[in-house]
Image (spheres, grey):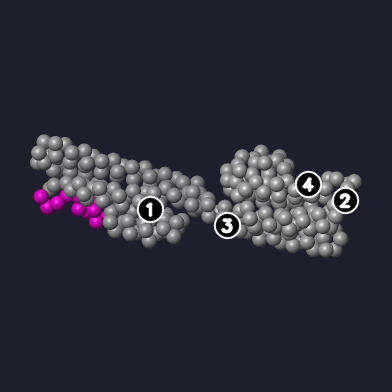
């Protein structure tokens, strides 16, 4: 199921949950009114309370049946908690009134507590999907970057110094772009490596990482642009190992 469809279903479930909660609040208000005048329900109030209680129970069971599949498919690590909350909410929803036709305040409170937890799980589904996708993409990208750095090391060992430096620079730039995406840093797609470093530095563990990238970028520039001062093997070796270290440290 596409994320857009999941968003729509989550939105509808939240709307349906809000209706159920509003009905529950209506019972709270009714209970408060009755308590204010001594605690005795009129026949009409008892009839209304029974009707609303039945409606809450039916709507909640329908809500859970749909929400369960969504949680199971997209948030399976929280499914057990979701089901545990259902055991509580379902019991309370079926016992909002006692055999004498009295609303039970404690039961209403417990229902709300369990149901609220379930609503929270459902609400978290879209952001959890995005987080998982970013995490998986990061792992796959890191594997590709390791392969590219290995290729750069092989080129360096065989005398292709500038070429090795250019590849390492591309890997470093790619990682900086991923960091910006992960932390919601706005990019226009035209940033240089140095500009990416400026934008991402707020998310580094310390200022040393910012200076490290500045230093590595200077080597990269000598490989890609400065034809008069050729980079040395040692410089490009530093670029490769420094990029590898930065990727492993700043994630």
Is the residue under label 1 in contact with that under label 4 (CB below 8 Å)? no
Q: Residue at x 17, y 46 (%)?
A: 103
| Front position among marks 4 and 1 | 4
Q: Residue at x 14, y 43 (%)?
A: 47
Asked if the stretch drawn in magenta spans residue 206, the answer is no
Residue position for label 3: 136
SS type, badge 1 = helix
Q: Quadrant of residue 242?
A: bottom right
Is the residue under label 4 in contact with that under label 3 (CB below 8 Å)? no
Is the residue under label 1 in contact with that under label 2 (CB below 8 Å)? no
Earlier residue among tags 2 and 4: 4
Front residue of 210 and 34? 210
Residue position for label 1: 67
Magenta stretch, overall SS: loop
Q: Left of 22 or right of it: where is 213?
A: right
Mark 2: few/some/many CA within 10 Å (<14, 14-19, 20+):
some
Q: In 3D space, how far apart are the residues under numbered discs 3 and 4 (Cα atoms)?
A: 31 Å
| Front position among marks 3 and 2 | 2
Q: In 3D space, how far apart are the residues under numbered discs 2 and 4 (Cα atoms)?
A: 12 Å
Across and down, in percent, residue 126 comes to 48, 49
Asked if the stretch drawn in magenta spans residue 94, the answer is yes
Mark 4: few/some/many CA within 10 Å (<14, 14-19, 20+):
some
Front residue of 79 and 56? 79
Residue position for label 2: 230
Residue position for label 4: 218
SS type, badge 2 = loop
Q: Provide the residue span drawn in magenta.
A: 90-100
Res. 224 in view: no
Earlier residue among tags 4 and 1: 1
Across and down, in percent, residue 163 comes to 82, 55
Q: Say how many tags the image has.
A: 4
Front residue of 226 and 88? 226
């Amino acid at each position: 199921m596409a994320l857009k469809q999941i968003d729509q279903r989550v939105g509808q479930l939240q709307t349906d949950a809000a209706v159920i909660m509003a009905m529950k609040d209506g019972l709270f208000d009714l209970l408060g009114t009755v308590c204010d005048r001594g605690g005795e329900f009129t026949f009409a109030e008892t009839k209304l309370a029974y009707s609303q209680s039945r409606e809450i129970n039916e709507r909640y069971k329908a809500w859970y049946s749909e929400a369960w599949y969504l949680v199971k498919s997209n948030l399976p690590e929280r499914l057990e908690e979701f089901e545990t909350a259902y055991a509580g909410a379902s019991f309370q929803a079926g016992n909002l009134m006692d055999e004498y036709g009295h609303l039970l305040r404690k039961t209403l409170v417990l229902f709300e507590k369990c149901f609220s937890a379930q609503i929270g799980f459902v609400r978290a589904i879209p952001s959890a999907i995005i987080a998982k996708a970013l995490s998986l993409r990061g792992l796959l990208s890191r594997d590709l970057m390791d392969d590219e750095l290995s290729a750069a090391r092989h080129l360096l060992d065989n005398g292709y110094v500038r070429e090795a430096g250019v590849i390492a620079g591309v890997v470093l730039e790619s990682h900086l772009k991923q960091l910006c995406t992960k932390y919601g840093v706005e990019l226009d797609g035209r940033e240089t490596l140095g500009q990416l470093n400026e934008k991402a530095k707020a998310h580094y563990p310390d200022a040393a990482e910012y200076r490290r990238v500045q230093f590595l970028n200077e080597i990269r520039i000598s490989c890609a642009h400065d034809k008069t001062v050729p980079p040395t093997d040692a410089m490009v070796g530093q670029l490769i190992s420094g990029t590898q270290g930065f990727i492993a440290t700043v994630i």
